[in-house]
Image (spheres, rainbow, N blue to C red):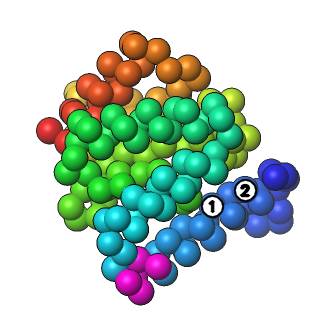
Amino acid sequence: MSTRMKSDGFSEAERAAMKERARELKAQGRSGQKKADNERAVLDAIAEMPDADRSLAERIHALVTANAPELLPKTWYGMPAYANQDGKVVCFFKAAAKFEGRYAILGFEDAAKLDDHPMWPVVFAIVEWTPAVEKKVVALVKEAVA
């Protein structure tokens, strides 16, 4: 997929993500999507990823659902995300291939409780899954919902 810029400043990939988000919102508004439907959408999104991204997304999905079962899986701009009971995204995974990036991202939104002093990280690049990465992801997810 090309990422050339159009006259409005958004790449084709960014426009596709916005259209995917609009479809997600429309589907949620129409049927109030059930938890099982949302999880199926997340698993389908993960299954469509290239191998390297899919492997990371599967690990993150397993860790989030095991360590923060109160978070509800859903897609967000076509990517896996996990929301609190109010529907606010706490964390998300963005595949490297999504915008032809160099690395995949595990990110946290405002609903995550990661506040630490006047500044703290909310986005983490992941290029390889290791025991240390797994330990850090588990700690971040648990802190985000604490």
Q: Quadrant of residue 88?
A: bottom left
Camera-side residue: 129 or 13? 129
Residue where numbered disc 2 is placed: 13
Classified by dominant secondary structure, the portion drawn in magenta counts as helix
Does the magenta portion include 28? yes
**Badge 1: residue crowd in 10 Å (few <14, some 14–19, many ≥20):** some
Which residue is located at x 38 percent, y 21 percent? 134
Relative depth, front residue between 7 and 58 = 58
Left or right: 12 with respect to 113?
right
**Which stretch is magenta?**
27-31
The reply to whether the magenta stretch includes residue 51 is no
- Which residue is the site of mark 1? 17
| Residue type pointed to by label 2 | Ala
Asked whether, in this view, residue 10 is left or right of residue 133, the answer is right
Residue 76 in view: no
Amino acid carrying label 1: it is Ala
Comparing 94 with 50, the one in front is: 50
Instruction: Evaluate whether residue 51 shows in this view.
Output: yes
Residue visible at 31% across and 65% down? 35
Q: Are marks 1 and 2 in contact (CB under 8 Å)?
A: yes
Q: Tell me how far mark 1 sits from mark 2, CA to CA.
A: 6 Å
Q: Residue furthest left?
A: 146
- Image coordinates of residue 47 in percent, x first then y, are 58, 49
